[in-house]
Image (tube, grey):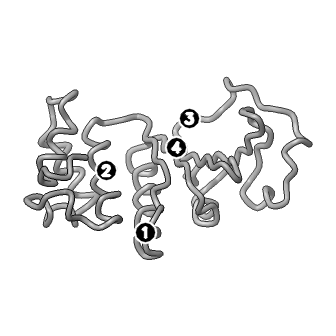
Amino acid sequence: MFPQSHVGENLKAASFRRPNGAAERLELVLGYFPILHEFLDRPAGVLSGGQLQILVIGMALMLQPKLLLLDEPSLGLSPVMVQSVFEIVERLHSDLAMTVVVAEQTVPRLMEIAHDVYVLSRGRVALHAPPGEVTGYAASRSKAIPSDQWPTGRIAHLTNSQEIYHETKR
């Protein structure tokens, strides 16, 4: 994100590696994030924390990723903006069949949109269970799941304290 550049310039710059279809992708991004439309001519540096998160996600979408990595998307946001960001993540997964990996501390909200949970221990998948069965789990009591059996097309959540991988509901 370039703070001195306008929001529209940031979105266009984000598509530099995939210039074909950039106008259509911009319309898609603005469809997901209509608030960005009113900020197209504003410098990105004047946006609030939640607005910046939306801009950064929009910039990533300009590249048509199959995998979207989000690091602490709720950090410093109001509860209303946290809810909005997680709703956007859920919509991106369901509408675009995109895999989303989220490093996050707000585990309860992610558990609401998860279908399956993967607990990691020492870099290995130690548990695969529905969200309701994860509470109180001791990671050392389970065998690791080989990486070739990990799911694709899911929302993931990896956090230092919980280390959980979530699949979204379909």
How far from the left and from the top, in percent, is residue 140? 89, 41
Contact, CB < 8 Å: mark 3 with mark 2? no
For marks 3 and 1, the one nearer the N-term is 1
Mark whose residue sits in front, 4 or 1:
1
Left or right: 53 as drawn, with respect to 118? left
Front position in the image: 71 or 128: 71
User: Which residue is found at the position 16% from the left and 54% from the top?
Assistant: 7
Residue at the far right in the pictured view: 141
Which of the numbered marks, if any, corresponds to residue 101? 4
User: Which residue is found at the position 48% from the left and 40% from the top?
Assistant: 99
How far from the left and from the top, in percent, is residue 114? 61, 55
- Residue type at numbered disc 4: Val
Q: Residue 55: name its quadrant.
A: bottom left
User: Which residue is found at the position 54% from the left and 47% from the top?
Assistant: 155
For marks 4 and 2, the one nearer the N-term is 2
Front position in the image: 35 or 42: 42
How far from the left and from the top, in percent, is residue 74? 47, 62
- Residue type at numbered disc 2: Val
Mark whose residue sits in front, 3 or 1:
1
Residue receiving disc 3: 152
Secondary structure at badge 2 equals helix
Q: CA distance from mark 3 to mark 2?
A: 23 Å
Residue receiving disc 2: 56
